Image (cartoon, rainbow, N blue to C red):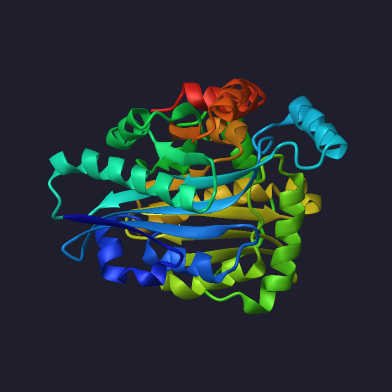
């Protein structure tokens, strides 16, 4: 007999049992505990679990929030939405229950290692049923799945079978490390990109420092973070300083903060997660006044590529933003889909119509190209 339960804290679930459902994930029990303890504003956490004879057999992360329908809009659409919000505050806001996490690129759904593959589709369906029930108990009509990976065909099928509407999500970029040196990597790029990167490498270099504690630098880091966030048109969550502190503390050497210095001034930082197989770029923040002169983003990119080569990592996972640059830098892309359904039929019909206008690739040609190029 299967028991389906939802919890408000991941500490209610055994660490080893949870990680057994996600054996290859860097964003594991420790990561979500760090996220939970960092108290990100406006989000409440849910952890969905299926038990068989008191043994965890399947699990998923979820959250609730007030979602603004213009979150993925850019350009003219964003400006029009801003005027609508000023005219009628709350018009575009809706309560949301979503599987996935605002601080993870993909929705993590996992089953225990001893579960036969043939059982997995039924367990995924049960997790979606549990999510719908949990949302109903919270009085939330809109159920969604944030960034279901196209590499998990069973999960995509389970979402379709549950009657959820589908739209493209932000693709995930990655650079396979198939070369033995930075120079060999540059040789794989287009002529103009290769020329630009080599010019950057010949210029003055910032001092790079890898850190596992950053308490002394957090005030300056948050200045850089807030400035970077203000320049972004795609903003879902706002990370507090405690997020960076907690992730570094709970993930031990599986998380690091790479600091970039010009003299005594901190001008950029890069939060990364890493293991023996890959480096995951979580967030890059920088001082715009120094970015153009010193090409800080490219410096950070090449530093991460160099680290992967030096330590034998196979994948540089580089996130869901900056698609124009990542296309030039040789990335490949894996697709993600967003699923949703509102229990109110009229609202669900309106959301089906709205998805034609809020798709992120509608206003970002580079993102559309990345979606076309996805694996």
Residue 115 screen position, x and y as percent: 15, 51
Which residue, as the protein is rendered here, is positioned at the far bottom?
216
Residue 296 vs residue 373, the one in the foreground? 373
Q: Residue at x 58, y 26 (%)?
A: 346
Q: Eyeballing the image, is 226 above or below 344?
A: below
Q: Which quadrant of the rendered structure holds the N terminus? A: bottom left
Residue 98 vs residue 237, the one in the foreground? 98
Left or right, 236 with respect to 137, comes to: right
Left or right, 17 with respect to 367, comes to: left
Q: Residue at x 29, y 45 (%)?
A: 126
Q: Report if residue 48 is visible in the image.
A: yes
Instruction: Specify the quadrant of the image occupied by residue 298.
Output: top right
Residue 349 vs residue 27, the one in the foreground? 349
Q: Which quadrant of the rendered structure holds the C terminus? A: top left
Q: Eyeballing the image, is 303 above or below 179?
A: below
Q: Eyeballing the image, is 269 above or below 104?
A: below
Residue 285 screen position, x and y as percent: 67, 55
Q: Residue at x 61, y 74 (%)?
A: 214
How many numbered marks have been drawn onto this rendered protein structure?
0
Q: Residue at x 77, y 50 (%)?
A: 288
Residue 56 screen position, x and y as percent: 23, 61
Residue 258 screen position, x and y as percent: 57, 63
Left or right, 74 with respect to 114, comes to: right
Residue 157 vs residue 140, the one in the foreground? 140
Q: Report if residue 209 is visible in the image.
A: no
Instruction: Specify the quadrant of the image occupied by residue 292.
Output: top right
């Amino acid at each position: 007999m299967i028991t389906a339960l939802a919890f408000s804290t991941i500490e209610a679930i055994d660490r080893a049992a949870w990680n057994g459902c996600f054996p290859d994930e860097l964003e594991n029990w420790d990561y979500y505990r760090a996220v939970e303890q960092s108290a990100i504003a406006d989000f409440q956490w849910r952890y969905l679990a299926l038990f068989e004879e008191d043994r965890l057999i399947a699990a998923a992360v979820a959250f609730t929030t007030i979602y603004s329908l213009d979150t993925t809009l850019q350009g003219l659409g964003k400006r029009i939405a801003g005027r609508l919000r000023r005219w009628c505050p709350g018009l575009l806001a809706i309560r949301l229950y979503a599987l996935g996490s605002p601080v993870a690129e993909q929705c993590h759904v996992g089953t225990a290692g001893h579960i036969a593959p043939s059982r997995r589709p039924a367990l995924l369906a049960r997790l979606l049923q549990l999510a719908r029930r949990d949302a109903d108990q919270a009085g939330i009509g809109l159920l969604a799945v944030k960034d279901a990976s196209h590499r998990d065909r069973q999960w995509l099928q389970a979402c379709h079978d549950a009657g959820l509407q589908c739209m493209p999500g932000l693709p995930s970029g990655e650079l396979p490390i198939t070369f033995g040196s930075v120079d060999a990597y540059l040789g794989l790029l287009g002529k103009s990109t290769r020329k630009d990167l080599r010019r950057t490498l010949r210029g003055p270099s910032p001092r790079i420092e890898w850190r596992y504690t950053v308490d002394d630098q957090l005030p300056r880091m948050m200045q850089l973070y807030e400035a970077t966030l203000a320049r972004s048109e795609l903003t879902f969550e706002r990370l507090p300083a405690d997020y960076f502190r907690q992730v570094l503390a709970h993930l031990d050497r599986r998380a690091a903060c790479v600091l970039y210095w010009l003299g005594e001034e901190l001008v950029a930082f890069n939060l990364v997660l890493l293991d023996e197989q890959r480096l995951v770029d979580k967030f890059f923040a920088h001082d715009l006044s120094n970015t153009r002169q010193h090409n800080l983003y490219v410096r950070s990119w090449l530093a991460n590529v160099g680290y992967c080569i030096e330590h034998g990592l196979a994948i540089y996972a580089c996130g869901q933003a900056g698609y124009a640059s990542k296309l030039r830098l040789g990335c490949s892309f894996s697709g993600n889909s967003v699923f949703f359904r509102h229990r109110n039929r009229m609202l669900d019909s309106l959301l089906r119509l709205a998805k034609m206008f809020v798709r992120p690739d509608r206003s970002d040609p580079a993102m559309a190209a990345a979606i076309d190029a996805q694996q």
